[in-house]
Amino acid sequence: MGLYEDFISIIYDKINIITQQHIDVTFYAWLIWLWWPFIFVTVILPAIIIVLLYVSASIVHIYKLRQDIPVNELLGPDVEFKVKARAAIALLWECHGWIWHGYEIVGFENLPADKRALVVYYHGVIPIDYYYLSARYSIKHKRPIWTIAADFLFKTPGLRGLMDVVQATPGTVQQIADLLRNDEIVSVAPGGVREAQFSNEYYELVWNGHLGFAKAACQGKAPIIPVFTQNVREAYRTAPFFRGFFRKIYEKTKLPLLPVYGGFPVKLRTIIGKPIPYDERATPEEVAEKAADAIRELIRKHQRLPGNIVSAMLDRIR
């Protein structure tokens, strides 16, 4: 009986070990299943844009090292590497916008092909709509839109070369005015990172009385073109908690630390409004108010309020 009892004891122990291992595997699988949607929305989808930015930066370095790489029929072989790199980057973002968001532009003809203009747009959590618009413009007109970008982008490792190639600049009032005098097209989001972080699903403008863009438009004698993208705030959103706390940090440091989630494949449609003509009698305050009113009107006409992520995704098939 002793041998029999020992055999039964060994079998019982093995069954316990196997069962315990199975339970552990099942538990870990359950944890992954439970947290997967959260990880997907907060880490994987937002990371796609970061990857695309660094792919764009890599394209810049590749063209800088190999200036003889052609860009098919888009450009001739004699143009400088920045122009070639910019064309390749534009194609990358054009494809991403078409595949992931069914990206469209309404009123593209309102953007001048070879004249001065100041494009003023609503700043989404991540301004992917502007990346797509800039790419489309670069492809169609073979010239870039000068971009007024946040300072922290120029300090982000690996992106400085990209900022130079896509002609992004921190931009003072004088610099913007000089570009406009040279018949360049320049874009600015008066709300900037503050609007990106702390606006909401009602698409409220957060300009904080900024007049720099209006002063530049007056000095550069340029029309203002209002731009808004439908559902841009449903593609990416900021966390709804501790907004006051993160707002205080931002006002002191200018660092956008409010957590971002999303990357949802919503329908994005950029609406380009009619130009607001240059008026030599208008003050910067009046110009800024006209621009704000024009963007609010685009929001009122073209945006479902409050914004809804599911409805924005269903817009892809409507």
Image: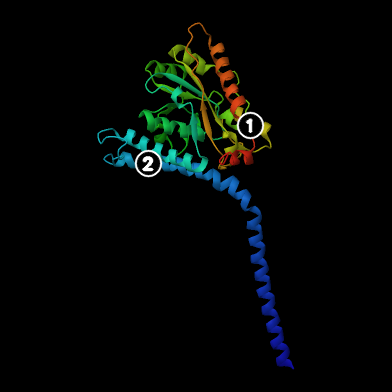
Q: Amino acid at mark 2?
A: Ile
Residue 189 against residue 132 in the figure, above or below: above
Residue at x 48% of width, y 13% of height: 277
Residue neighbourhood size for the residue with mark 1, other residues' Cα within 10 Å, grouped as few (<14), some (14–19), many (≥20)? some
> In the rendered image, which residue does mark 2 sit on?
59
Cβ atoms under marks 1 and 2 closer than 8 Å = no
> What label does residue 257 carry, if any?
none
Work out whether residue 236 can be spotted: no
Above or below: residue 220 compared with residue 85: above
User: Could you give the CA–CA distance between mark 1 and mark 2, rounded to whole angstroms?
Assistant: 37 Å
Task: Tell me where residue 2 sits by quadrant.
Answer: bottom right
The residue nearer to you, when weighing 111 against 28, is: 111
Query: In which image quadrant can residue 177 be found?
Result: top left
* Classed neighbour count for the residue bearing mark 2: other residues with Cα under 10 Å, few (<14), some (14–19), many (≥20): some
In this rendering, the label closer to the viewer, 1 or 2: 1
Judge from the rendering whether residue 35 lies leftward or rightward of residue 100; answer left or right. right
Q: Is residue 49 above or below residue 138?
A: below
Residue 49, image x, y percentages? 50, 41
- Furthest residue in direction front, as rendered: 318
The residue carrying mark 1 is 304
SS class of the residue under badge 2? helix
Residue 102: x %, y % from top left: 50, 39
Query: Label 1 amino acid?
Result: Arg
Point out residue 223 in the picture as x, y percentages from the top left corner: 46, 16
Q: Please, which colouring scheme is shown?
A: rainbow
